[in-house]
Image (spheres, rainbow, N blue to C red):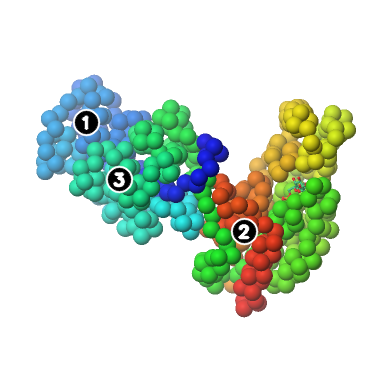
């Protein structure tokens, strides 16, 4: 994403409503289809209104403009009329009014459904102190947001009614008005849009980042319209922002948790243990170990290390251990490894042999063989040329073995290319946790590395992701703590919070 070049954080997110936050886009499409098909059936040689027509000519535009643009695409013209035209008039306004009456009827019958991923992202960004706006060209925007319970979830709402009152012509002016209402410059705001017209407006308005949401499989169109980043899942969208420190927000965490039972998940290197020059030297402090021992709730450590190695370094009984980035899980009578990972061991063997032969003797390179993966460390390598050589060789190894390559902190890793990672391991563990009561557990996940982002992403509303590192980050976490020392403080606070629910 283009965010890497920025050194200042984004301050606001402006969400399009229909199709991004609410599922009303389908209702709009149905309403448009009903009225256009009726009209087209009375014209000669016209095919019915399609989803392609909807996406190309109508989606994301003010109602009457949508009518005009679609009719124009079919070489049809109607008198414009006036907004007060009755719904049975064959004018641009009449057709638009007919569509609205049809839409409201559908809304009444079917209600408003929201996209959970976008609502969860909105909540996360709000917790992180981002300014938020929802925009829509729909004159029914406020009504829809009230029904969806989202009216109070953001700072500014600009819908078609507000746009008409303020004489805002089109999406770009609506976006600018939202940025103005949030008191941020467009360059410091992120636009989240599913319509090509909206993406184009975001680009034209020079907003800092334009995210295209491809729920309709329209990636190509969104890319051509100029989206910086395309996603089908808003929850996975990351950009540079300033995370609050979890230690300053323990009361917010406690309010979020409510009466749910606690479960604590942690990464090892860089989280429980300080990063060291050599992997073999990383150690958990005695304080951190005894903090883990004090928890009565479930605790799991999920690491890129081999599980046995991890277990012997952490050395706490009664907790869950997931090694090899979650490929190998065990604890409290449970055991889980993936058959696909077992089948890939021969390729890891092959990769290891290649690594030892081609970079094993290079000064500073450390090769760490794990059961399901191989790490080639270059933290101690002094020469940039050698680092480059390591990169090239690992890329070669990836091509020849079919294993997946992952970047870590001064390490390149190869692992089985299957749909499994720390996030999947986290969800697997959540499912087997021995939690009492009917409420789902409140999960706290603490991690510092790229692979922990899969876990942050898998959390959704289960609880906070806490990133270990600088506040200024692209992490998908909700909060940060600075370093393993602050992780220890966090563990103490969580242990206190765990005590009353024993
Ligand atoms: O998931 P984690 O527990 O964070 O493990 C990720 C990798 O951590 C280790 O490497 C990292 O820590 C080393 C010790 O501090 C450091 O020397 C190295 O540069 C880091 O990349 C571990 O050796 C790997 O196997 C893990 O995958």
The span from disc 1 to disc 3 (Cα, nearest Å) is 25 Å
Q: Is residue 427 left or right of residue 94?
A: right
The span from disc 2 to disc 3 (Cα, nearest Å) is 35 Å
Mark 1 neighbour class, 10 Å CA radius: few under 14, some 14 to 19, many 20 or more: many
Does ligand 1 reach within 8 Å of label 2's beta carbon? no
Q: Report the mark closest to the observer, 1 or 3.
A: 3
Q: Is residue 51 left or right of residue 341?
A: left
Q: Which is more toward the observer, 343 or 222?
A: 222
Q: Which is more toward the observer, 133 or 247?
A: 247
Q: Is residue 200 left or right of residue 412?
A: left
Tell me the residue that label 3 is attached to: 177
Tell me the residue that label 1 is attached to: 68
Q: Report the mark closest to the observer, 1 or 2.
A: 2
Q: Residue at x 85, y 32 (%)?
A: 362
The x, y position of residue 210, in whole percent, is: 44, 38
Does ligand 1 reach within 8 Å of label 3's beta carbon? no
Q: Is residue 48 left or right of residue 214?
A: left
Q: Secondary structure at mark 2?
A: strand
- Along the polypeptide, which appears first: circle 2 or circle 3? 3
Q: Is residue 13 above or below residue 295?
A: above
Q: Which is more toward the observer, 426 or 496?
A: 496
The disc at residue 481 is 2
């Amino acid at each position: 994403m283009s965010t890497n070049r920025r050194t200042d954080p984004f301050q606001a997110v402006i969400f399009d409503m229909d199709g991004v936050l609410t599922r009303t886009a389908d209702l709009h499409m149905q309403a448009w289809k009903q009225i256009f098909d009726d009209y087209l059936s009375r014209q000669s040689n016209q095919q019915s209104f399609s989803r392609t027509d909807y996406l190309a000519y109508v989606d994301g535009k003010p109602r009457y403009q949508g009518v005009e643009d679609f009719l124009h695409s079919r070489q049809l013209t109607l008198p414009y009329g006036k907004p007060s035209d009755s719904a049975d008039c064959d004018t641009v306004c009449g057709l638009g009014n007919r569509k609205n009456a049809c839409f409201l009827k559908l809304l009444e019958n079917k209600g408003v459904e929201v996209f959970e991923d976008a609502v969860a992202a909105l909540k996360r960004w709000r917790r992180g102190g981002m300014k938020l706006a929802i925009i829509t060209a729909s004159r029914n925007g406020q009504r829809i947001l009230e029904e969806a319970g989202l009216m109070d979830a953001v700072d500014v709402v600009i819908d078609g009614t507000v746009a008409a009152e303020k004489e805002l012509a089109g999406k770009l002016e609506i976006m600018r008005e939202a940025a103005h209402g949030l008191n941020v410059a467009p360059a410091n705001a992120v636009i989240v849009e599913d319509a090509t017209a909206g993406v184009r407006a975001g680009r034209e308005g020079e907003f800092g980042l334009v995210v295209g949401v491809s729920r309709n499989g329209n990636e190509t169109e969104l890319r051509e319209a100029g989206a910086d980043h395309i996603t089908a899942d808003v929850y996975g969208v990351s950009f540079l922002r300033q995370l609050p420190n979890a230690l300053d927000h323990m009361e917010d965490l406690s309010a979020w948790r409510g009466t749910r039972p606690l479960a604590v998940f942690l990464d090892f290197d860089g989280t429980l243990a300080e990063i060291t020059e050599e992997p073999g030297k990383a150690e958990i402090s005695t304080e951190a170990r005894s903090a883990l021992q004090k928890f009565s709730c479930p605790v799991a450590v999920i690491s890129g290390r081999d599980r046995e190695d991890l277990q012997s370094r952490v050395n706490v009984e009664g907790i869950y251990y997931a090694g090899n980035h979650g490929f190998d899980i065990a604890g409290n009578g449970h055991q889980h490894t993936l058959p696909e990972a077992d089948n890939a061991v021969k390729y890891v063997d092959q990769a290891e042999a290649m690594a030892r032969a081609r970079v094993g003797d290079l000064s500073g390179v450390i090769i760490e063989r794990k059961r399901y993966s191989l790490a080639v460390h270059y933290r101690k390598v002094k020469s940039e040329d050698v680092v480059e050589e390591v990169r090239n060789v690992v890329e070669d190894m990836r091509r020849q073995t079919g294993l997946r390559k992952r970047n870590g902190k001064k390490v390149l890793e190869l692992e089985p290319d299957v749909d499994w990672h720390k996030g999947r391991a986290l969800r697997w563990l959540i499912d087997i946790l021995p939690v009492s009561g009917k409420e789902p557990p409140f999960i706290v996940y603490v991690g510092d590395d790229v692979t922990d982002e899969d876990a942050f992403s898998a959390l959704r509303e289960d609880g906070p992701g806490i990133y270990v590192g600088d506040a200024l980050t692209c992490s998908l976490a909700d909060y940060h703590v600075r370093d393993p020392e602050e992780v220890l403080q966090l563990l103490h606070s969580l242990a206190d919070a765990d005590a009353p629910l024993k």
